[in-house]
Amino acid sequence: MSTPLPGTPLPPLAGGAGGRAALRPLLDTVLDALHEGALARGGPIPSGGPDTVAQRLLDATATALPDTGTGAEEALRTLVQALAHGAADPADPLCVAHLHTPPLAVAAAADLAVSALNPSMDSWDQAPAASALEAHVTRTLAAEVYPHGPAPDALVTTGGTESNQLALLLARERHGPVQLVHGANAHHSLPRAAWLLGLPEPVAVPAPAGVIDLAALDEALTDLHHPLLVAATAGTTDTGRIDPLPEIADLCARHNAELHIDASYGGPLLFSDVHKHRLDGLDRAHTVTLDLHKLGWQPVAAGLLAVPGTAALTPLAHQADYLNADDDTEAGLPDLLGRSLRTTRRPDVLKIAVTLRALGRQGLAALVDHTCAAAQHLADLVENTPGLELHDRPTISTVLFRPTSASDDDIATIRRTLLTEGRAVLGRARADDRLWLKATVLNPHTTHSDLKALLSLLSHPSLPSPLSLPEGSTHR
Ligand SMILES: *Cc1c(COP(=O)(O)O)cnc(C)c1O
């Protein structure tokens, strides 16, 4: 065994008696480095494209594992600044490509406490209060989804992908190899989960108008052999549309198929009195996926899989003597292994719990309402800008638009040019057989002038089909 050399102090810990004194100056360093990195970037994403960004990062960091360390202050300053300089920053209102949320300050601060305490959610003796908090908060959130459920409960996951996998796994454990029937508008993680779980090849039902075609679903459910699991989407990734949930639930009931609803994006509409009616029918699903790192403003990861009753989760029961020995469980130590397929697991529930308490239902509703209103305003602006075409009024906060005179290739080039010049981070989506620019508005602080600025970027002369050019002057 080696002992440290005299004069070489060991680095301090985040927790324990010295944690506060050790962390406070380091946090100042981190906050300053974040600020300086953002100033150096000067926009929603660094300019120059992948090679420039990678080279700048390598230049700043030099060797990743030096023989002699540079010390905590220098390492934090250098790497945090480099990361912030090279970030796609969702807190910038022109960063709207994906369901990539700007996290709330309160949630990020709560996450620091998790890093310092480092509870692990695989056994009670590693997370006594954190496991109790998780049980409390997941039941509360599940009751929002299933107000009439016998014992609403939810698992905390890394996001929609894991939640969807668990939903398929639970269906398989109930019924054997279920056939997944999903809309063509469903998230790619659903067919991938069917592949992962060795289920029959999934069936994709057409969604020509962006939502599942009910007649086609009816036909598929009539023709296919059981057991069947239908996956509907409340908030599609491409357009933010919500499948007709009550009608789909009716069809599932008529054909004796199970229903999973992927509400990764739309789930938090539940908090808003203005918008929650769009999720009518949600509680008729056997399982519901929610993602609070999208419309819930949480740092990654903050996923949930809700079920109407805890009993639905029993297939996940699992035993490992060192974590949940029978006699420990009988003696009253909570058994956590059945709450996830992961073993070591971060208590992502703390930032969620702190956010729910800090904002309350009204505060969350205000964030949802502001965000949806910003998207409606963007749609208004598009409709009122000559030379721009709006795909459709937004259902949640996704707006698809395109310069009228642009070809699909132009759209792809416009997006990449704005990205590599560091001006804006817009997404792309195919709808009605055409390519569109996609703005996924998630930043509740977005102002009308931010949205105007976003659209005015489209008249930049470096772009194909710039808006100021008369129509028809570009190739099709
Ligand atoms: C984002 C999303 C997912 C995947 O969620 P992750 O958190 O990225 O794993 C699944 N379904 C839908 C509809 C989504 O929007």
Image (cartoon, helix red, strand yellow):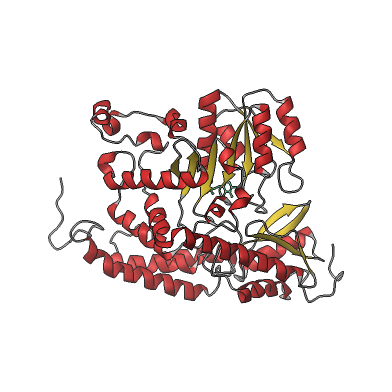
Left or right: where 152 falls relative to 395: left
Q: Residue at x 37, y 45 (%)?
A: 136
Left or right: where 233 falls relative to 119: right
Residue at the limit of the structure toward the front, as seen here: 148
Name the one closer to the observer, 35 or 337.
337
Picture coordinates of residue 104, whole percent (x, y): 45, 63
| Position of the N terminus by quadrant | top left
Quarter of image, res 321? top left
Can you say whether 40 is above or below 125 in the image?
below
Name the one closer to the observer, 195 or 222.
222
Q: Residue at x 66, y 56 (%)?
A: 395
Residue at the limit of the structure toward the right, as seen here: 472
Picture coordinates of residue 436, whole percent (x, y): 73, 59
Q: Is residue 420 visible to the viewer in this orientation of the structure?
A: yes
Name the one closer to the observer, 215 or 343.
215
Picture coordinates of residue 88, whole percent (x, y): 53, 64
Left or right: where 213 falls relative to 93: right
Q: Residue at x 23, y 30 (%)?
A: 331
Quarter of image, res 379? bottom right
| Position of the C terminus by quadrant | bottom right
Picture coordinates of residue 358, whole percent (x, y): 40, 61
Quarter of image, res 224? top right
Name the one closer to the observer, 19 or 464.
19
Left or right: where 203 falls relative to 68: right
Can you say whether 227 is above or below 111 in the image?
above
Can you say whether 168 is above or below 437 in the image?
above
Count the labels in the image: 0
Q: Is residue 62 visible to the viewer in this orientation of the structure?
A: no
